[in-house]
Image: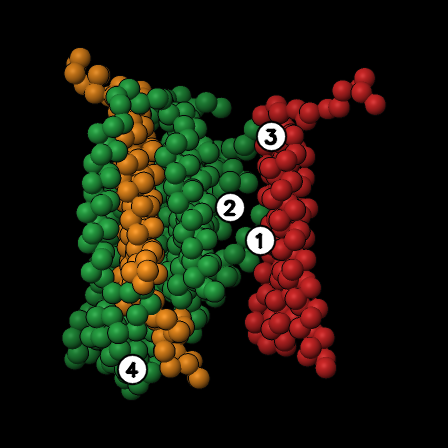
Amino acid sequence: MQYLVDIVLLGLLMITGFAIVRMRSLLAVTMLTSIYSLFSALLFVVLDAVDVALTEAAIGAGISTILLLATVALTTEYEKVPGHRSLLPLLVVTLTGAALIYGTLDMPHYGDPNAPVHRHVAPEYIEDTPEEVGVPNVVTSVLASYRGYDTLGEVTVIFTAGVGVLALLGVHLRKRTEQPHDYKMLVVLRVIAKLLFPLILLFALYVLFHGDYGPGGGFQAGVIFATGFVLYALTHGLGNAERVIPPALLGVLAAAGVLLYAAVGIEGMLLGGKFLEYNVLADDPVSGQHLGILLIETGVGITVAAVILIIYFGFVSRRPGGADAQDPS
Amino acid sequence: MLDMLLDILSWILLLGGALFLLTGAIGVLRFPDFYSRLHAVSVCDTLGAGMVLLGLMLQGGLTLVTVKLMLIFYFMVFSGPTAVHALAEAAQVSGLDPVEDDPEDG
Amino acid sequence: MSTLLGHYNYWIVIVLMMTGFYTVIARPNLVKKIIGLFIFQTSVFILFISMAKVEGGTAPIIEEGYSLYSNPLPHVLILTAIVVGLATTALGLALVVRIQEAYGTTNEDDIHIQDETD
């Protein structure tokens, strides 16, 4: 019976994918991409990957849609008909697909408990987590403790992306508190945004600290935190949003998160252990693990939230026509 | 006895909610004009989602899961109609006029 | 028949991957290409996560009464991949915005024509 849900969701994904290829209105394609992310998040829940589903829903259906909309607003809205014929790409794609399908014939059956991927390291992680780390969510313990070094690299990648967008686009500060031109008509949206804004931030903190016991963690929390500010910026205007959270502060925060993460690692070394060893951070190893995981998840959340807001401000404050164009208002 | 009653009630709510969501989807496809489609979606979606959540709350009993479902319900009640309002406002500001009845037809 | 039941997940994912690949190579608009990359990425995530699923298992959160869990290791890898995917998409879109300002268009054919006549 659960195969039915699988097949229906995958079928819907295929239909959405084909529609994205065929449509020429880029706004419609953006919305279809958001729907595609949401369907894959649903599929992840059906496949028992709850952390991944939360992340995909927050990032794919949330932030990516906003960035795509901002880009479409700054560029053209319609795609022109391709000039060349599409027979050669179709051939290449069919050949590649056939080769890949031939390759999957050797793969283990879907859902097989004896597949090689379940044999070597994963059972160790599942068995050792209650004694060594003491955290029920195995994904968090693997992400933050067993594979903490990878996560440090990941946080650095996000930080680099923020730096890159700053270098490419920059953030143009508005000179005064600009109201959007339809300020009077947005009354309902402004009231609801003000009501929901603190709840969204609170929920982000909940996801951050509850990531040990359920789905959650630093990345999801950072994204949800940034989404609250994006909601505020959308309804109250960019000038107000830049006064609430100045972009200069965001640069400092992005760096501070990565610094916190690396500092926890070096603290482990200073206390006698290895880099990123949490066992030495407190009196007994399990408390040390808890403390270490808490600190690095906070660092990750801070960096992710700051970088997403930097990227958002970079896109939205760009005047169409370039950095030297006149202010349209 | 009470358990079975709660079970049946929650099933009625779940199926009813699914029926309303289906009706909303059919309304989006069949209505002739943007504003009427928006109306179909807003009413049927919020009601359908609310009924599904209530059915799940009855299935959950008096646990922490029910509290979380109640919070989700409040959030949906706030965000659903607000999103539809934003869409309708944006459409009106862009100049989309509702299709009106031909006054000569009966 | 058992091959079909055991592998249909992977095959549909490959169809999705090829849809994204086709969008990248056959559509001339730059934003569409980035969206095609996004589709490709997401379908690769689905491939990994369906390899991690164990039949009869549950989500990898240790709880009393459950003994069989889905494999948490691909979940961790895909979590990283999703966030890195967001980073690259954001950078790609920033580049598209600058290309639009430099060339006046985001259509690949027009950009080639402009480059050749310069």
Alpha carbon separation for disc pair 2 and 1: 9 Å
Q: Determine the CA span between mark 3 and mark 2.
A: 20 Å
Disc 2 target residue:
A231
Q: Same subunit under labels 4 and 2? A: yes
Q: Colour of chain A?
A: green
Residue B24: quadrant of the picture: top right
- Left or right relative to A219: residue C91: left
Colour assigned to chain B in the rendering is red
Q: Position of residue A88 (x, y in %)?
A: 21, 29
- Cβ–Cβ below 8 Å for labels 3 and 2? no
Compare residues A14 and A157 and report the one nearer the observer: A14
Q: Secondary structure at mark 4?
A: helix
* Label 1 crowd bin: few (<14), some (14–19), many (20+), radius 10 Å: some
Residue at coordinates 45% horizontally, 47% vertically from top-left? A12
Q: Nearer the viewer, mark 3 or mark 4?
A: 4
- The numbered disc on residue A127 is 4
The chain identifier of the residue carrying mark 4 reads: A
Q: Of helix, strand and loop, which one carries label 2?
A: helix
The kind of residue on which mark 3 rests is Ala
Dot 4 crowding, Cα within 10 Å, few <14, some 14–19, many 20+: few
* Same subunit: marks 3 and 2: no
Which is closer to the viewer, label 1 or label 4? 4
The quadrant where residue B8 appears: bottom right
Vertical order, A112 against A204 (above or below)? below
Q: Disc 3 marks which residue?
A: B91
Is residue A222 left or right of C71 when viewed as pictured?
A: right
Q: Residues within 10 Å of mark 2 (few under 14, many from 20)?
A: some
Type of amino acid under label 1? Leu
Residue A208's quadrant in the figure? bottom left
Please give the name of the residue rendered at 72% of the width and 75% of the height, measured from the top-left corner: B5
Whichever of labels 1 and 4 marks the residue nearer the N terminus, that label is 4
